[in-house]
Amino acid sequence: MAERWHADLRILKYVLGFLDQGVLSLASILFLVLAAQFLSPEDLGAFVLGLSTAVLIQSLVRALSGETLLVRSTWTDFSHSETARSLGLSLVMAIATGIVLAGISFAFPQDSQFYLSLAVAQLGLLIQDGVRFAALSTGRTGGLLILDSLYAVLCCSAIYVSGLLRLGSSGMLTSLGVAALVLGVSGMFAFRISPRFGAGISWLVKHWQLNSSFVAEAVLGAVLGYSITLILNFFASASELAAYRSALSIFGMTSLAINFLRTMVLRDLRQSHLRRSRSYWRKLIAMSVLVGCTVGSTYIVLSFLPMSVGSMMFGETWMLMISLFAATALNRFFAGLSIIPTIFLRVQGITWRATAVRIVVTILGFGLGPVGAFLAGAQGALLAEAMLYLMLAVSLTLLSRKSTRRGLHRLGDRKLRRRLAAAPAIDRG
């Protein structure tokens, strides 16, 4: 009876976690759709640039704090006090980044409004994201769903009201940041998490070998994506670039499965779950099916979406986007597959060895993505990226399985237990 109750509770947590990711994915699309209703193409470009920059900063800071915290929570020597340290580190990074952006606004007075609004946007988003990962690490799925739902409603409302008041892209970025900040501070009180600033810095130093590999991966992905953007902008056309970014944005619902795996599933995985071959492949297949179903259902919905609805959201760009749906679906499917062995490797305690594989594959990617964009525009870029993700998925899966077999075959039971107990403190990569 108790086992069944625990199984039902786990299913409920996963359902709530999946809904939570769905809310965030929908919100990311609505941000762009709402802004597009009020802004000129030029001003919309400024909003997208600011939001993209804030999200990029968020991904780098998250690699240092939130993602490291989540991975640490799966290891045997994890202490709950690390939650407060991680949140403190996020706040330190948010304030430091805000000061830097404010300084840049004085150096470039003609763009001061943009940089100041970006400073507010990233401050709010970083604090909200830090609280979110702190709640994730403690398993508060229900409360997290409520907080993220309020985040989506409040931020969308802030963008909409800014549009009605004709505050422009800078006003939208500022209001978005303020809304996220309010939710982040409220979350600290709701989850009773007090940030520890000085301890956060020492926590960063202590786990530098772990979080530095996550930052390296985030930087690699950002550089590759930005190079494709530049190629499309200078060697294809602005319309190709707009179609490329818009197609990836509208397929953002596929991030629902990817982020669900990277957060909820990662939080509950343990090294013991991956030791047996049957358990390993069963989990890999189940996750692959989840990614495939999410991407497939998104593709079907978009394929049957009325032309009038698509044109209302994206204007003339919708016609170009339609021709990219198949390539984008393939791109997102293989991107999702590459996340699965990444999750396994993090639970196994393998960091820099996995990062080294990513570096090698990404170097090859610079010969695929930008070249594909140069030769075949947006569709070529999407297909080339899909090939890169497939190579990454295969390479990381082989590394994960090799590490699992080596751990089981070369060690006796006593030594194996000793190594698993020491694994969180030692980077096996």
Image (tube, rainbow, N blue to C red):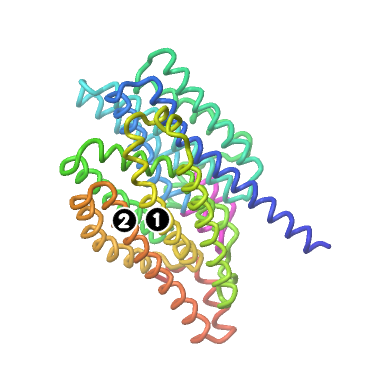
Residue found 57% across the figure and 53% down from its top: 264
Q: Chief secondary structure of the magenta span?
A: helix
Residue lying farthest left? 235
Amino acid type indicated by mark 1 = Leu
The quarter of the image holding the N terminus is bottom right
Q: Which residues are magenta?
A: 68-88
| Residues under numbered marks 2 and 1 in contact, where contact means CB atoms less than 8 Å apart | yes
Residue 198 visible from this viewpoint: yes
- Which residue is disc 1 drawn over? 330
Q: Residue at x 19, y 46 (%)?
A: 231
- Label 2 belongs to which residue? 383
Q: Is residue 255 visible?
A: no
Give the mark, 2 or 1, whose residue is nearer the N terminus. Answer: 1
Residue 82 at x, y = what percent? 53, 51
- The structure residue drawn at horizontal position 31% and vertical position 33%, both measured from the top left corner, is 49
Q: Quadrant of residue 220?
A: bottom left
Estimate how packed mark 2 is, as few (under 14), some (14 to 19) or many (20 or more) residues with alpha carbons within 10 Å.
many
Q: Does 26 sit above or below residue 267?
A: above
Q: Where residue 274 sits: x, y (%)?
A: 55, 72
Q: Quadrant of residue 211?
A: bottom left
Q: Please say if 295 is above or below 111.
A: below
- Kind of residue indicated by mark 2: Leu
Q: Circle 2 sits in a helix, a strand or a loop, which is it? A: helix
Instruction: Give the residue furthest to the top.
Output: 165
Percent position (x, y) of residue 121? 40, 30
What kind of element bears circle 1?
A: helix
Classify mark 1: residues with Cα within 10 Å, few (<14), some (14-19) or many (20+): many
Query: In screen coordinates, is 374 left or right of 152?
Result: left
Find residue 71 and name its label. Answer: none
